[in-house]
Amino acid sequence: MENSSETPVATPKEAVFIYSIPTAVFVFDGNIRLVQKIKIASPEAAITALTRNEWLPEETAVIKKARSEGKSVVVLGAKTGKPADAAFSQDIKKLEAATSAAAEEIARLRDIVIGFTKRAVAESVTDDNLIIQSSSAISELNKAASILIKRVREWYELYCPEASRQVGSHEEFLNAILCKSKDELLKEFRVKDAMGANLEKADIRMILSFATEVNALYEMRKGIAEYVNNLMEKHAPNVAAVAGPSTGAELIAEAGSLQRLAMLPSSTIQLLGAEQELFKHLKDKKQRPPKVGVLHSHPLVTSASRDKQGRVAKILADKISIASRVDFFKGAFAGDRLLEEVKARLAK
């Protein structure tokens, strides 16, 4: 349907003019004097309709009444489509007069629009947003912790290098130095001749204070990871079952939403998170194309030999594609079956 353009109108004495805003429909006589103001029952619905230049029920009621009285009707503004019993006008002077008459109602409209916008923003927050933000938080915490734990180790090595060398796990290392003294650690590691410096108590306190803050990052990461697991079990249980909650959340974050993930082909899902490597390959054919993106952290991929990881990721991506569609369309749980199908194909 096309928007109506300026239409010849009847003489002012024979016509009534209507002008609408989301809170009311104003009816004017031929001289643009206000005759009637009709309150709109649902301003929020009217905002949507008027934005699209659609007809309001209140407007059609005015037109019907006017026609029954033998009057012609002129709509100030534009509409999508034009009924046979209404004309249109974009006359600037008439529009200014109508706007002036509606000034008080327009001022009230401002508060309604602000409230409508606030509710729209609140309703736009979905489980997808929560998954994306929490998954991104874990990724950033991993980066921060990876940098800071190196500083803790190097700093503590000035005092007790044996502890850093004996404990490989970062979290176990933090737990060891925060819970045990240097003498206890040396005894546990059966070290007789310690190499570390004899630092002042203030120096040791500062090292352990810093280690405490870094340890808090690891604890925070655990808490957020558990939160992500719960979100995924609720919002995308099939993706969580096939990809794992953490990896599934990363896939949704990379895609932008569960809906977008469900619309992607499996070949794209396989490479989500490997865009930079793919662009490097496209720019320079000497660079090897990536075989896997976010899925590199999936246990089935990490346990495969390097030359088979691409095949494993391809099979996984195929089932994740199905799982994401089932989750998006709220289908029955099929995650365990899909994962078993992945394992069955890999066993061949």
Image: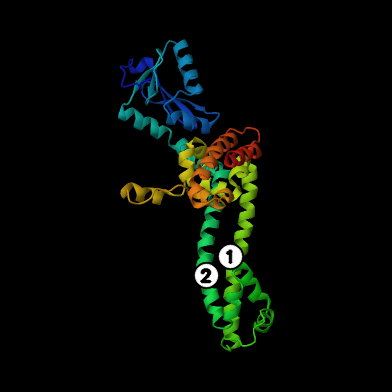
Disc number lying in front (2 or 1): 2
Asked whether residue 160 appears in the rendered view, the answer is: yes
Q: Residues within 10 Å of mark 1 (few under 14, many from 20)?
A: some
Tell me the quadrant of the picture where the C terminus can be found: top right
* Relative horizontal placement of residue 183, taking residue 40 as reference (left or right): right
Q: Which residue is mark 2?
A: 148
Q: Kindly state the secondary structure of the residue where label 2 is placed.
A: helix
> Which sits in the foreground, 80 or 223?
223
Tell me the quadrant of the picture where the N terminus can be found: top left
Residue 167, image x and y in percent? 61, 72
> Which sits in the foreground, 66 or 293?
293
Q: CA distance from mark 2 to mark 1?
A: 10 Å
Quarter holding residue 103: top left
Q: Which mark is residue 217?
A: 1
Q: Which mark is residue 62?
A: none
Q: Kindly state the secondary structure of the residue where label 1 is placed.
A: helix
> Which sits in the foreground, 268 or 249?
268
Residue 136, image x and y in percent? 52, 54
Q: Amino acid at mark 2?
A: Leu
Residue at point 49%, 42% (across, down) = 269
Residue 84, image x and y in percent? 39, 12
Q: Height in image: 203 above or below 237? A: below
Along the polypeptide, which appears first: circle 2 or circle 1? 2
Residue 125, image x and y in percent? 55, 44
> Which sits in the foreground, 295 or 136?
295
Q: Height in image: 176 above or below 135? A: below
Q: Tell whether label 1 touches label 2 (CB within 8 Å).
A: yes
**What color scheme is it?**
rainbow
Q: Residues within 10 Å of mark 2 (few under 14, many from 20)?
A: some
Residue at point 53%, 78% (across, down) = 155
Residue at point 33%, 23% (across, down) = 89
Q: Amino acid at mark 1?
A: Leu
